[in-house]
Image (cartoon, rainbow, N blue to C red):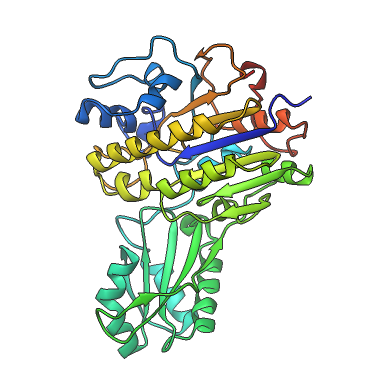
Amino acid sequence: MEAYKRIFVIVLDSLGIGAMPDSEKFGDKGVDTFGHILERMGTLDIPNLKKLGMLNLHLAGNMKAEENPIGRYMRLGEASNGKDTMTGHWEMMGIKTEKPFRTFTDTGFPPELIAELEKRCGKRVIGNKSASGTVIIEELGEEEINTGAMIVYTSADSVLQICGNEETFDLANLYRCCEIAREITMKDEWRVGRVIARPYVGKKKGEFKRTSNRHDYALKPTGLTALNALKDGGLDVIGVGKINDIFCGEGITKTYHSDSSVHGMEQTIEICREDFHGLCFVNLVDFDALWGHRRNVEGYGQEIEKFDKNLGVLLGELRDDDLLILTADHGNDPTYSGTDHTREYVPFISYSKKMGSGGALENRDTFAVIGASVAENFGVDMPEGTIGESVLDELV
């Protein structure tokens, strides 16, 4: 017998709540994304997160905990060896990653990788640094067109991106080079989560525009996940935002592309107003992409406030047999040095109108309790080799 007909899992991308015991091994001493934002800003206008118990779970700044929180909450540690988006999301659905994905944000890609890419693609590489895609095209687009070179760049995530002018590079050739890059970056020391083709048009600065012919060469999850089990069981698995890309489409029955985190919440609210049976899995990336990596405390705080407003709307739309789970996939402390993610605990905040009362749950040492709980609710078995134990009996 299902406790819930629909479950919404919303990932506030990078909203960590304090350093894990092993954080120093990842270069992250004393990090605390949510706590340090509160300390810097003093207060945040987050009445809905507050009443769910976020401040009971993690208190800082000038704010006070909720006297009678309506949500049930706990802190989750990460069992996997990593602190990136794919590792965190895959673990939520049952996969423990032992070999972390590589990022090259501060150094660019190593000379050996670039040399092999140039040799096999037959093109000289320019760029090779962390950059905004639109900015690097403005900077190097004319050189690429005039010399036949190839713009390669990365970001704060585990990604290798190649720009190509559709008129002078040719889409088929761009895709070929990206396929070569994907093969090269399967090596452990160069293993990135995604290779992305970034085609554009235009002949000179000020005219360049990226096109819709982008293509992602993502790694598939290293095993079956709770999403596969749900889909195979005939249930709806709706992905909003980056979810479909993160899982390379595995286990997804319907996907929605989001233009922003606000848009993602608006889509989730609309989905909540429709009938479905299963899981709605949402990633809200702007916390991470726009503010965490750019070390913008105020922007991050304001993004949390924007989320809270739409959270209030969603809470009003939830049905009696709905379960809401809020969580994160890693940290990205905007007060910390560098631009990388940070190794942190993440929140688990749950709410349903069925819950008689809120309060603290016992902390767990893996994100995988989420997938295991969803699977148990819908009566499907987690795939062999997955991790995580259900906490469903504590959520009803």
Quarter of the image for the N terminus: give it: top right
Residue at 48% from the left image edge and 33% from the top image edge: 327
Residue 351 x/y as whole percent: 54, 23
Q: Please, which residue is most extreme toward the top here? A: 67
Residue 116 x/y as whole percent: 46, 74
Residue at 64% from the left image edge and 37% from the top image edge: 94
Residue 363 x/y as whole percent: 51, 19
Residue at 56% from the left image edge and 30% from the top image edge: 324
Residue 315 versus residue 17: which sits nearer the camera?
Answer: 315
Residue at 67% from the left image edge and 17% from the top image edge: 393
Image vertical order of residue 4 relative to residue 183, above or below: above
User: Is residue 82 visible to us here?
Assistant: yes
Image vertical order of residue 81 relative to residue 356, above or below: below
Quarter of the image for the C terminus: give it: top right
State which quadrant residue 57 falls in.
top left
Residue 85 x/y as whole percent: 47, 46
